[in-house]
Amino acid sequence: MKRLLFLFIFLPVPLKASPISGGFTTGTMNSTTTSVQTIVESVVSKDYNSGYTYSVSGTGVELQDSGSMIPSAVQTSGTTDGVSYSWTGLNFSTKPTFKQTENGAAFQLTESYMGPGLSNVTTINRNITVESTTVTQSIFQK
């Protein structure tokens, strides 16, 4: 019996295969891919004046003393929002003083000062959404 089993193991056996044939002649494959991207932006712009503007105008007035019309300047430095600065400003203790030229008469005096520092902050917040769609079609035939 062992010999028969040994004989069957080594005997060649013919194998038969059938050809594979699909049931289609042509076809298409469609694919659609859509992606959406959202970009969030925040833009902050800060404008700084690095010097100062001082102006005086008027009628019916004159300098209190014969001092200078031009006050002295003073250096200012510091840090704001992590930004270091050094600016030139007006020394108010040296600005000129005025008096009426004629007591009781009409007069006008205007002093204007714009000092150094932050003058304007502009903030723009925006969301940008971009959507893209790709459509692919594959056509195949046998």
Image (cartoon, rainbow, N blue to C red):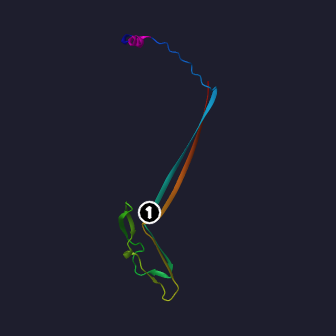
Residue at 49% x, 54% y is 41
Q: Position of residue 137 (x, y in %)?
A: 61, 34
**Region in magenta:** 4-11
- Displayed quadrant of residue 30: top right
- Displayed quadrant of residue 86: bottom left
Residue at 49% x, 12% y is 14
Q: Position of residue 46 (x, y in %)?
A: 45, 61
Q: Nearer the viewer, residue 142 or 137?
A: 142
Q: Is residue 10 magenta?
A: yes
Establish if 25 lies above or below 107: above
- Quarter of the image containing the N terminus? top left
Q: Is residue 87 magenta?
A: no
* Farthest-out residue, front: 1
Residue at 50% x, 78% y is 58
- Displayed quadrant of residue 117: bottom left
Q: Position of residue 32 (x, y in %)?
A: 58, 40
* Farthest-out residue, bottom: 104
- Give the dominant element type of the magenta stretch: helix, strand or loop: helix
Establish if 4 lies above or below 82: above
Tag 1 secondary structure = strand
- Quarter of the image containing the C terminus? top right
Establish if 50 lies above or below 108: above
Q: Position of residue 64 (x, y in %)?
A: 42, 81
Q: Nearer the viewer, residue 130 or 83?
A: 130
Q: Which residue is mark 1?
A: 48
Indicate the amino acid at tag 1: Tyr
